[in-house]
Image: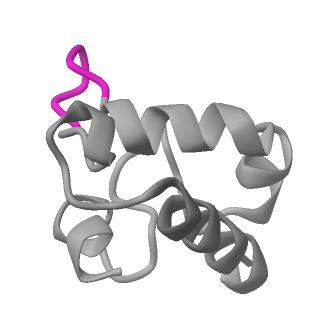
Amino acid sequence: MKYCAMCHGQDGLQVPVAPLGRKSWLGSKATEFLVVIIAGGKTSGGMPAWGLDYGGFMAREEILAIVQYLRSIAQ
């Protein structure tokens, strides 16, 4: 989570278009959508790619675990 918090903040609410700390926002996004964004990044928003296939260091299983974790702690 330290990599997410650098931009999204400790509460996940610093990036208005992607409020990771909001259960309602996360609930409106399919798991695969979130995995694709985390893995491949978002060049228009300045988010780096974290997936192995895109030059990052996270395997798909790790990204899935992050999505599950975010869903479990969102308010």
Report the front residue among 50 and 20: 50
Q: Would residue 21 be found to the left or right of residue 53 on screen?
A: right
The residue sitting at 76% across, 38% down in the picture is 29
Q: How many marks?
A: 0
Q: In the displayed structure, would residue 64 be above or below residue 48? A: below
Outermost top residue = 44
Q: Image quadrant of residue 44?
A: top left
Q: Would residue 45 be found to the left or right of residue 40 on screen?
A: left
Q: Would residue 1 be found to the left or right of residue 55 on screen?
A: right
Was residue 44 drawn as part of the magenta stretch in this picture?
yes
Give the position of the N terminus as an image quadrant: bottom left
Report the front residue among 6 and 30: 30
Was residue 43 drawn as part of the magenta stretch in this picture?
yes
**Position of residue 63 measured from the top left corner of the image (x, y, whole percent):** 51, 60
Q: Image quadrant of residue 72?
A: bottom right
Report the front residue among 39 and 52: 52
Report the front residue among 13 and 27: 27
Q: In the displayed structure, would residue 71 be above or below residue 2? A: above
**Position of residue 58 measured from the top left corner of the image (x, y, whole percent):** 33, 61
Q: Image quadrant of residue 9?
A: bottom left
The residue sitting at 34% across, 82% down in the picture is 10
**Position of residue 24 measured from the top left corner of the image (x, y, whole percent):** 82, 53
Give the position of the C terminus as an image quadrant: bottom right
Q: Main secondary structure of the magenta part?
A: loop
Q: In the displayed structure, would residue 74 be above or below residue 32? A: below
Q: In the displayed structure, would residue 5 be above or below residue 42? A: below
Scheme by which the image is coloured:
one colour
The residue sitting at 71% across, 37% down in the picture is 32
**Position of residue 16 measured from the top left corner of the image (x, y, whole percent):** 43, 42
Tell me which segment is drawn in magenta.
Answer: 42-47
